[in-house]
Image (spheres, rainbow, N blue to C red):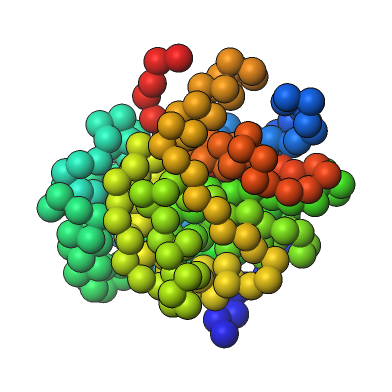
Amino acid sequence: MTTVPDVTSAAERIRPYVRRTPLLRAQVDGRALALKLEHLQRTGSFKLRGALNALLTGERPDHVVTASGGNHGIGVATAAAVLGLPATVYVPSTVPADKARRIESAGARLVRTGTRYADAAAAAHEAAQAPGARYVEAYNDPVVVAGQGTVGAEIVADAPDVDTIAVAVGGGGLAAGVALGSGGRLTVAVEPERCSCLHQARAAGRPVDAEVDSVAASALGATRVGAVPFEVLSGPDVVSLVVGEDEILAARDRLWEEFRLAVEPAAAVPFAAWLAGAVPGELPCVLLCGANAEWTP
């Protein structure tokens, strides 16, 4: 079993650099819920937390390297910048233009290579072999998972009566971190039905490749859940759900209509499951993980 570092220590480590994002208590359709507004985090997503914890743990590198489909790259570029480190982010040619722009505006060198995330990751891992370079994993790293778990710790500190946390899953780092940082509360891990690597891995008993074809794929487009998150997310306090494309878009639009919250499709995935009545609990919390997609209400 992989040992994930303490989430409390990670929270102390990254505290000077991240926002403690708000938690909103609300009622929708007569049902109570809490919304964790992590899309208001610096960089527009939770990814900054794990990147900072990775770069603040161990020996300081001379150069930071990563591969990303978007949000992770923005998080790593920003983490490197605030720590005074140069960074290079490899992305596939399919990266959304706005996310590419934000990676570069954070100060990183952007390298486009191949048409798939796997192509970018292969090139980035090769570049990270250079002396003094540090590769920052998107999700399959215990230190990154601990950093992402700080958002779960914030939820339970600000709303101890929350009994369930619903969270979107890509490679699994955020969901695993939330499960570890939530004090034993139920974690509902939700994926698009056409990007469901965790759901398929739990059915198979091991990480397996899954198709990537969803409106939320730019953020949740991992082809295989990470081995480190999978160990955590295979536990009894985790429920795995999938939602459809129309449900995701309807949930995104409902967040705008109801609360004027503008989030990307990935962030609406757990809210879609809650709207469908699939998230249990007296006071569930829906984690809105990012807002790095352009759209018109």
Q: Position of residue 73 (x, y in %)?
A: 36, 48
Q: In the figure, is residue 84 to the left or right of 143?
A: left
x, y percent for residue 45: 50, 40
Quarter of the figure that contains the C terminus: top left
x then y, percent, for residue 13: 64, 59
Residue at (16, 44) in percent of width and height? 93
Which residue ends up furthest to the left in the rendered image? 114
**Looking at the image, is 213 positioned above or below residue 215?**
below
Residue farthest to the right? 161
Q: Is residue 247 visible?
A: yes
Q: Relative to the observer, which residue lies in front, 6 or 220?
A: 220
Q: Position of residue 111 (x, y in %)?
A: 18, 48
Q: Nearer the viewer, residue 275 or 71?
A: 275
* Left or right: 178 in relation to 297: right
The residue lying at 47 percent from left, 70 percent from top is 203
Is 234 placed above or below 50 here? Answer: below
In the image, residue 239 above or below residue 293 = below
- Image quadrant assignment for residue 259: top right
Give residue 251's quadrant in the image.
top right
